[in-house]
Image (cartoon, rainbow, N blue to C red):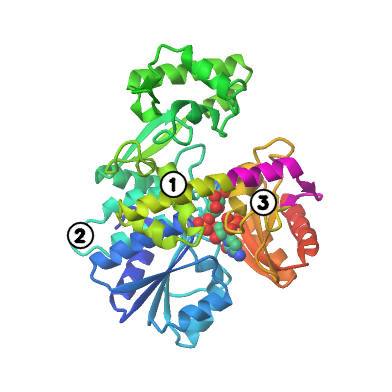
Amino acid sequence: MGPVPDLSERATACADRLRQADSVLLASHIDADGLTSAAIASTGLERADITHDVVFKKQLDADEIASIAAREFDTVLFTDFGSGQLDIIAEHERAGDFQPVIADHHQPADRETEFHLNPLLEGINGASELSGAGASYLLARALEDGTDNRDLAALAVVGAVGDMQAVGGELVGANRDIVEEGIAAGALKEGTDLAFYGKQTRPLPKLLEYASEVRIPGISNDEAGTVSFLEGLDVELRADGEWRRWVDLTDDEQQTVASALVQHALKRGVPANKVDQLVGTTYTLVDEPEGTELRDASEFSTLLNATARYERADVGLGVCLGDRTGALDRARKLLQNHRRNLSDGLQQVKSKGVERAEHVQYFDAGDEIRETIVGIVAGMALGVEGVDPDRPILAFAEKNDEETKVSSRGTARLVGQGLDLSVVMREASQSVGGDGGGHDVAAGATVPAGAEEEFIEAADDIVAEQLE
Ligand code: C5P
Ligand code: C5P
Ligand code: ZN
């Protein structure tokens, strides 16, 4: 039956079709979810003795799909994209170029194909209940042939967390069923812990000081304040002259720091609902060594984003597939660079500010933020001062001389009121000669350079209608 019964028929059909293929090309997206999708699908295929090649694409469009068709594989498995481009893919299918099999979670274009595994087709939310990696996991489970692929649930969780699917810090819906399979298979552990990024790898003061999830006066961005806060606690802060990390603390010590942090935040006037966000659900990959990025789903996903979004998908895939020497070292170097870029990008938004249309706000990063990470920066920008946290944000970045990339991010509250950015991005971009799509809460597009103003107006109008 599989862990998500509503999707089991589709998963089985896709798996059966792949078993009949003469040659399979696996094509996937260049982010954490796309990489984990590819690793899961590739492992599932390999364990089922289905040989295949793997390629990664920044974005699927008519040209990229044509280049895939030119490789003359009889079957193409698309993971973490494909649904949004079904109109183009279906043309190739009709022409006999290749048989598509799709495991995706993006808003489908207005077209159908026979082997299509997507939560949205069965009323499951593709932005919060199942990721591309989750869809690929269901496929891998359906490909089992006396094997047990439940170990791959760990990577599916990394993909979902990387796509920001954890609602209030916790995976829900079909994602939740996958978490349970991973726990049962002994690949995953779930716990309640401090909700900060970097518990495995950051020195204690940096963990608290850099945390952007909740702003705490006297701690956030305050090195001296953080150190003096920590020194006031009855906890050994250093070992062999080095700062300890969160994972190095005993349970009792962690409890001491967490309680003191909550007290400190309340005393400094952080609202109770924000203080609640200091603690959340964490997903631990139990087979990975403690104190490494790979042990924590959130750190793992950031490590992966640091590879494929910088044209090194090979490195990220290597890490997912278990390469713990060359690929991991390489990924760590890329991570330093990625972190710096995110922090520079956010700094740029803070200093330049955002502009406002009637219903959306926007900023143009020009060539100062890579188009592959401008969406991450836009999401982070919704939390900074001077940016309305409750208004959809659009972010432009130069793609090349002819094209501009646009990323958009919203909030759960706005989605509740009717916002669907996948529709906004698709329709507004198409109205100016571009194309786009994605999810209700996060979507993207490519538009012709010079059409930005017209695009903003079109997007503003659509948002107005949706929020009416
Ligand atoms: O292409 P893909 O679906 O994998 O990417 C999803 C994107 O949407 C990620 O960049 C993720 O950060 C963003 N997202 C978000 N907030 C959500 C859900 C997704 O920013 N609630
Ligand atoms: O690139 P960005 O992070 O802004 O993408 C947000 C979401 O929109 C992702 O799920 C991505 O796959 C999707 N997207 C799309 N078509 C585009 C650009 C982005 O479907 N042209
Ligand atoms: Zn995805």
Mark 1 and mark 2: Cα distance apart in space: 26 Å
Residue bearing mark 3: 419
Q: Nearer the viewer, residue 183 or 46?
A: 46
- In the rendered image, residue 129, in percent from the top left (x then y), is placed at 47, 49
Badge 3 or badge 1: first in the primary sequence: 1
Mark 2 and mark 3: Cα distance apart in space: 43 Å
Mark number displayed over residue 342: none
Numbered disc in front, either 1 or 2: 2
Q: Nearer the viewer, residue 93 or 295?
A: 295
Point 29% across, 63% down: residue: 44
- In the rendered image, residue 293, in percent from the top left (x then y), is placed at 39, 42
In the displayed structure, 396 sits above or below 20; it is above
Badge 2 or badge 3: first in the primary sequence: 2
Residue 449 in sight here: yes
Point 39% across, 45% down: residue: 176
Point 31% across, 57% down: residue: 321
Q: Amino acid at mark 1?
A: Gly
Tell me if label 1 and label 2 are in contact, CB under 8 Å.
no
- Label 3 packing within 10 angstroms: few (<14), some (14-19), many (20+): many
Span colored in magenta: 342-363
- In the rendered image, residue 137, in percent from the top left (x then y), is placed at 35, 57
Residue bearing mark 1: 173
Taking the magenta stretch, the answer to whether it contains residue 351 is yes
